[in-house]
Amino acid sequence: MTTREISGQTRLCGVIGDPVEHTVSPAMHNAAFKSLGIDYVYVSFKVRKNDLASAVEGARALNIRGLNVTLPHKVEIIPLLDELDPLAEKIGAVNVIVNDEGLWKGYNTDADGFLQAMLEQGIEAEGKKITILGAGGASRAISFALAGRCADLTILNRTLASAAVLACEISKNFAVAVAALELDRKNLVKALEGADILVNTTSMGMNPDVDSTPVAGDLIRPRLTVVDIVYNPVKTRLLAEAEKAGARTVSGLNMLVWQGALAFEKWTGLRPPLELMRREAARALKKHEK
C-alpha cells in the first residue's frame, strides 16, 4: 500500500496484544480506510499482560478511536472499560473497543465473525457434534456462538479448570450438552469420536511456532471439518495434516476478515469493503511467509 498523508485530524485505531508481530490487521484496515477516502490510520501495539491497565489509560488520554483486542487480553480488558455490549457481556470476552466521545465500550465481533466465516464456506453448525480446543477469549466467543446451534459441545483445554468454568457458563445459557476435558491425546480420541467439526482456538501452530499442532494427524478422519482460527500461516500444520487425511479445512483468515469488517463498521459507521480487506490480508500474509 502506498504511503498516504497523516493529518492533524487523522483518527487512530489499532490492535493491542502480545504477540502482535504476526498481525496483518494494519494492512487490511488501512487499505479499507484508503479505499473509502476516510482520514483514519490503524497500527499495532505490543502490550504485555502487566502493562494492560496503563496501556488503556494511555489510549484514553490519546483519544484513540477504537481498538482490536487480541491474545492475551480479551477477558482481562473488561474491568478497564466503561460499558459492555450485551453480547460481549454474555460471552465474557471483548475483541473490539469503541471510543464514543470518551465512553469506552467493549464489543465482541469474534462470535459473529466466526459464524459468517463458516456460513461463507457453506458449513452449518445445526445439529452437529463439535469439539473446541482452548478456553480463552476466542474460545468463549466461538463456544457461545455455536452452543445455540449445535447438538453437542466438548471443550478441551490444557488447564481443565478453565474449560470446566466455560462449560458451566454455557450450560447455564443454552440447552446443549457440554463436556470439559483436559487437552491430551486420550481425551482427544474420545472427543473426536463421532465429531463433525473441530475448532482450534489455541495459538498452537501460529508463526513462528509453525511446527506445533494441538492434534496429531493420525486422529483426524476424512468426515471431519477442521477449523483453525490461527491465520499466520494461512495453512497451519493442523490444517495441512487435516487436508492430508481427507478432512475439510477452513483457514483462520476467513474469521479474521469477518471480525475485522464488523469492527471497521463500528468505528466508522461505514460498510466495509470486505473483498478488498480479504485480498490485503492475504497479500500481507504472503509477505510474512517469504
Image: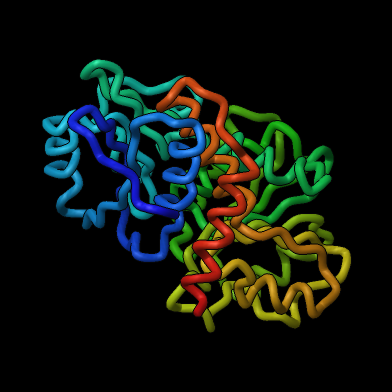
- Placement of the N terminus among the 4 image quadrants: bottom left
Name the residue at 63% across, 36% down. 145
Name the residue at 27% across, 24% down. 104
Image-based side of 88 in relation to 98, left or right = right
Image-based side of 242 in relation to 97, left or right = right
Q: Quadrant of residue 76?
A: top left
Residue 114, percent from left and from top: 63, 43
Name the residue at 82% across, 68% down. 247
Name the residue at 50% across, 27% down. 265
Image-based side of 244 in relation to 4, left or right = right
Residue 75, percent from left and from top: 36, 42
**Measured along the vertical axis of the image, is residue 45 above or below residue 11?**
below
How are the residues colored? rainbow
Q: How many marks?
A: 0
Q: Quadrant of residue 286?
A: bottom right
Residue 161, percent from left and from top: 44, 54
Q: Is residue 156 visible?
A: no
Image-based side of 90 in relation to 144, left or right = left
Q: Quadrant of residue 151?
A: top right
**Measured along the vertical axis of the image, is residue 165 above or below residue 59?**
below
Residue 243, percent from left and from top: 78, 74
